[in-house]
Structure formats: C-alpha cells, structure tokens
Image: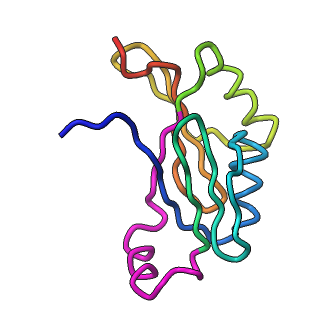
C-alpha cells in the first residue's frame, strides 16, 4: 500500500470548548466547522483534525473511547525554522513540555499533552529525513 498523506485524525475530548481553545488559539489550527455539543473540525495544512465530544458518541463509540482513551497520539511538523519558536510558545501558554528527543536524523521533537491528556508530538521540519 502507498498513501499520499494522512487526511484526518479523530480525537475524543471531554470538553469541546477547551479543545477549541487549545487547537485553535494555542496551536493555530483553522476551525473549519463546529457543531455545538458534538464536534469541531480543524485544518492544519492539508490535514483535518476532528475533535468529538465524548458524550456525543454512540454506545459503540463509547466502548472504543474507553479502550484507547487517553492513549491517543498525534504528530505535528513545525514549519522550517520554527521549531524553537514553537517550544517558546508553549511556555507563553503555560503548557509543560513533558519530554524532548533527538531522532536519528539529528532533528528534534518535543511532547506536550492537550487538555484531555492526548499526547501531542511537535517535530522539526523533515524530522524523519536524514
């Protein structure tokens, strides 16, 4: 199989307002749509992130949430030259950087949690390129 991109990611959240504040106001995603008490759709580049309010899920969806929650993980790639600035922005917003690593390529990545405890990894541009 071959893919051209990751089109969208879905996360279950406890508080949709906090998710909107985090992904839109702090990380700078553009909000594409919002359905009160249901979900918000964000756009970053050509990828969409959909945050579903956990209580709006079907019974089957609730079981899936309980299986995986909160161990969901997404990766965001910094624009070229903006990695350090992104790290500084976390401090400005009082968001704790819980870890930082250097890949085999020599490029760095740092890790934070969103308001629901999802792991967010923010990498340097082309972090997997050597």
The residue most toward the bottom is: 59
Q: Is residue 48 above or below residue 34?
A: above
Quarter of the view holding residue 82: top right
- Tell me what residue is drawn at x 79 percent, y 46 percent: 25
The percent position of residue 101, horizontal first and vertical second, equals 46, 27
- The quarter of the rendered structure image containing the C terminus is top left
- The quarter of the rendered structure image containing the N terminus is top left
The percent position of residue 80, horizontal first and vertical second, equals 58, 15
- Tell me what residue is drawn at x 62 percent, y 21 percent: 83
- Tell me what residue is drawn at x 75 percent, y 43 percent: 26
Report the magenta residues as a range.
54-76
Q: Nearer the viewer, residue 40 or 130?
A: 40
- Residue 68 within the magenta-colored segment of the rendering: yes
- Residue 67 within the magenta-colored segment of the rendering: yes
Quarter of the view holding residue 7: top left
The residue most toward the left is: 1
């Amino acid at each position: 199989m071959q893919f051209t991109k990751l089109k969208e990611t879905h996360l279950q959240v406890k508080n949709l307002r906090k998710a909107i504040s985090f992904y839109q106001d702090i990380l700078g995603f553009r909000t594409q749509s919002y359905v009160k008490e249901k979900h918000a759709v964000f756009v970053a580049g050509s990828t969409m992130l959909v945050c579903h309010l956990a209580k709006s899920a079907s019974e089957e969806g609730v079981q899936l949430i309980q299986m995986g929650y909160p161990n969901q993980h997404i990766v965001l790639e910094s624009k070229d030259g903006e990695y350090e600035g992104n790290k500084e922005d976390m401090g400005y917003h009082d968001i704790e950087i819980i870890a930082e690593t250097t890949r085999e390529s020599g490029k760095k990545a740092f890790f934070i949690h969103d308001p629901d405890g999802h792991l967010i990894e923010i990498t340097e541009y082309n972090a997997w390129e050597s």
